[in-house]
Image (cartoon, rainbow, N blue to C red):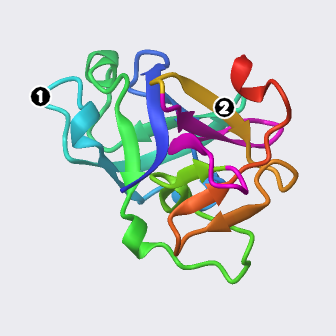
């Protein structure tokens, strides 16, 4: 499953929710009629349905306001708070661009230096305004953010299960 968004909170009293977007293609993923899978590991209420169908969607302050079919009041919308919205990663087309990767392709890759020093494992990708950030679980258990730019991540080796990093001095000291 590929996480494409997260329901942050209700908006108003008629079931609309604020969705934080976690995809490069929100205009393709968040359209009326789209059926999104709710991440079973993040369902905060037992009555959250396994899928939600988008009824309406509109942009609002770098987020989306969404109404899902059957969710028409604030009480029902409140139960969706924190739910991750997903699509089946197997259904996504493969990109022709050798420098373009989907989040699900990067998660789980080992982060290493050109000499093989272990920096950690990619546990997710954050979509920040300036660039994507690889979130690493460091060997000591801490997390680190690495800008996903060519100067710092010169190589992504999917077949080898690794990303090669050339981090600037002090990046992991933050």
Residue lying furthest bottom? 96
Res. 99 image quadrant? bottom right
Say which residue label 2 marks.
145
Observer-nearest of 49 and 138: 138
Q: Is residue 31 visible?
A: no
* Left or right, residue 80 beside residue 21: left
Quick check: 50 above or below 158? above
Residue 18 among magenta residues: no
Q: Judging from the image, what secondary structure is the residue with disc 1 in?
A: loop
Q: Nearer the viewer, mark 1 or mark 2?
A: 2
The range drawn in magenta is: 113-139
Q: Tell me the number on the disc at residue 74.
A: none
Query: Dot 2: what SS?
Result: strand
Please tell me how crowded label 2 is: few (under 14), some (14-19), or many (20+) other residues with Cα within 10 Å.
some
Q: Farthest residue in the left direction?
A: 46
Q: Which residue is mark 1?
A: 46
Estimate how packed mark 1 is, as few (under 14), some (14 to 19) or many (20 or more) residues with alpha carbons within 10 Å. few
**Res. 11 in view:** yes
Q: Earlier in the sequence, mark 1 or mark 2?
A: 1
Location of the N terminus by quadrant is bottom left
What residue is drawn where x is 20% and y is 47%?
50
Residue at image coords 43%, 37%: 67
Whole-Å distance between the Cαs marked 1 and 2? 33 Å
31 lies above or below 59: below
């Amino acid at each position: 499953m590929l996480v494409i968004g997260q329901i942050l909170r209700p908006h108003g009293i008629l079931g609309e929710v604020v969705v934080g977007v976690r995809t490069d293609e929100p205009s393709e993923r968040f359209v009326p009629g789209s059926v999104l899978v709710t991440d079973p590991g993040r369902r905060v209420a037992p009555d959250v349905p396994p899928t939600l169908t988008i009824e309406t969607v509109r942009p609002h302050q770098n987020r989306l306001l969404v109404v899902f079919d059957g969710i028409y009041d604030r009480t029902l919308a409140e139960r969706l708070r924190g739910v991750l919205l997903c699509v089946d990663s197997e259904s996504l087309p493969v990109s022709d661009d050798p420098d373009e990767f989907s989040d699900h392709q990067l998660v789980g890759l080992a982060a290493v230096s050109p000499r093989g020093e272990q920096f950690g494992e990619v546990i997710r990708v954050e979509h920040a305004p300036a660039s994507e950030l690889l979130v690493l679980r460091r060997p000591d258990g801490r997390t680190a953010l690495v800008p996903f730019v060519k100067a710092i991540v010169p190589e992504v080796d999917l077949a080898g299960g690794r990303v090669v990093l050339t981090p600037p001095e002090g990046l992991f000291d933050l």
